[in-house]
Image (cartoon, rainbow, N blue to C red):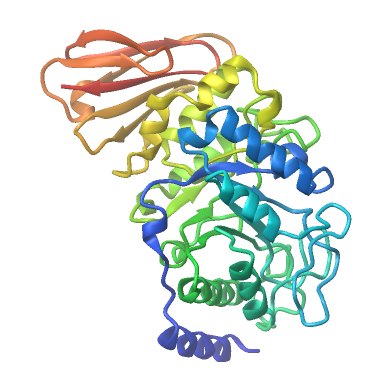
Amino acid sequence: MSKLLLALVLIGWTSVAQAQIKRELTPTPPMGWNSWNWFGKKDINEELIKKIIDTMVDEGLRDAGYNYVVIDGGWRDTKLGPNGELLPHPVKFPNGIKPLADYAHARNMKIGVHVVPGTHDCGGDLVGAIGHEEVHMQQFVDWELDFIKLDQCKFVNDPCSDCPKTKLGWSEPNAEEVYRKWSKLLYEADRDILFSISAYTYRDWYPEVCNMARTSLDIQSRIHRGGAYFNPPAEIKMAHMSVMGIVEKNNAAAAHAGNGYWNDPDMLATGVQGLSINEQEAHFVLWCMMSSPLFLGNDPRVMSKHEKQLILNKELIAINQDPTEQGKIIKREGNTQVWAKQLKNGQVAVMFLNLDTACEQEMTIDLKELGFKGSVKVRDLLKGKDLGEYAKSLSATAETNQCKVMLVSK
C-alpha cells in the first residue's frame, strides 16, 4: 500500500472513529504490580498470581494504592483458538483468566493481562490480535478485566510496503491506526478497562489514545543477564535500558503528562535486582517525581525491610499521586541534577541527585528558581524529618548515585 493511499485510509478512519479514552480511570498515575521484571515468561502460573494478590493485601501494598495486578507474557497458549480467540496456557493457567479476576476482585484488587496488537508476540508465537480485535475485546469484557497492556511486539507484512519499518516490522502509520482502533474499542466497551500502550518510545498521539504509554525500551531487571543498572557508562551494551538511560527519555516527554494520561518509564526494579540501596531509593524517588505509573516489578513475598519501607513511603507516594505536573530536571551541573515538581497546594518537591561515580557532591538551588520568596519550611521525605526553615537557597550533599528529596513549603 502506498504512503498516499494509507494516509487516505487513516484520514477516513480517524474522521469517523476519533480515539477517545476514559480519563476518569487515571486522574492520578495508576499503581500496581507486573509479573515481568521478576518472573519473566516462564515462571508464572495461576497459583503464583493468587499468592501475589494475597501478599499485596496482607503486606499493605493494596491499601497504599498498589491495586492492579498485571499478568505479563507467559499466560497465553502459543496459538489462537479456531475463532481467533485468546487461549490461556493449558498447564500454567488451566482454569483460565476469569477465576483469577474473580479472586482479585474479591480482595478489592484489579487485574489485567499483557496482549499484542500485531501478528506475533515478542517471542514469535502467532497470537497477535490483528484481525481479531473485536473477539479479543469481548473476551476482556467477559473475563471482567480492568487493565490491558498492549505490547507492540511483532508485525509481519505491514500494509505500508514502502514505509520505514521498526525492527519488529511496524510502520508508523500502521502502528497509529491499530492503536487508535484499540482505543475506540476500549472506550466503547461495556466495562472500564485501563489502556496501557507499550511501544517503546513516546509518540505525540499517545495522550489522545491511552491512559499510559511507555517512553522507552524495557528497563534492565532481574530477568536480564546482569540485572538492573542505575547509571552505567555509555559503552555498556544496555546503558540505554538502565534507570538513568530511561529517565532521560521520559524526562523529554514531561510536558505531555497529565489530564488522565501518564508517561510510563516501565516497571520498578526495586528489591534484589542489581541496584544498591542508594540506587533503589533514587530509582523510586525519580519515578515519584516523574508522576510515573508505579508498577512494582518485584516479588512481594520476599521484600526486605528497606524495600518495603521505601515503596510504602506515604509522603513519596503522595508526590507521585499529585497530578499537577510531571516533575522534571531544572538544573544540571557536572554529574549532578536538581529536579522539581510543582504540587497542587503550592508546595514543591525537590530532588538532588548525584551521578558522580567517584565522590560525594554538594548541590544548591536558589529558592527563586523554585518560585519562592523569603524563607521556606523544608522536610526530608526519605527520613521523614523536618529540617527547619531555609532562606535564599536550598542545599544537600549526596553520595555517589544517591538522592536527597525534600518537600518545600511556605
In the image, taking residue 364 as reference, residue 159 lies left or right, namely right
Identity of the residue furthest to the right in this view: 91
Count the numbered circles shown: 0
- Name the residue rendered at 11%, 23% in the picture: 373
Does residue 249 sit above or below 298 in this rendering?
Answer: below
**Residue 86: % across, % down:** 75, 70
Q: Quadrant of the C terminus?
A: top left
- Name the residue rendered at 65%, 30% in the picture: 300
Residue 216 visible (yes or no): no
- Name the residue rendered at 27%, 29% in the picture: 348
- Name the residue rendered at 84%, 65% in the picture: 125
Does residue 79 sit above or below 329 in this rendering?
Answer: below
Q: Quadrant of the N terminus?
A: bottom right
- Which image quadrant is residue 80 in? bottom right
Residue 21 visible (yes or no): yes
- Which image quadrant is residue 199 in? bottom right
In the image, taking residue 43 as reference, residue 104 lies left or right, namely left
**Residue 183: % across, % down:** 50, 71
Judging depth in this view, the residue of 12 and 312 nearest the camera is 312
Judging depth in this view, the residue of 336 and 79 nearest the camera is 79
**Residue 335: % across, % down:** 49, 22
Does residue 410 sit above or below 339 in this rendering?
Answer: above
**Residue 297: % across, % down:** 64, 37
- Which image quadrant is residue 242 in? top right
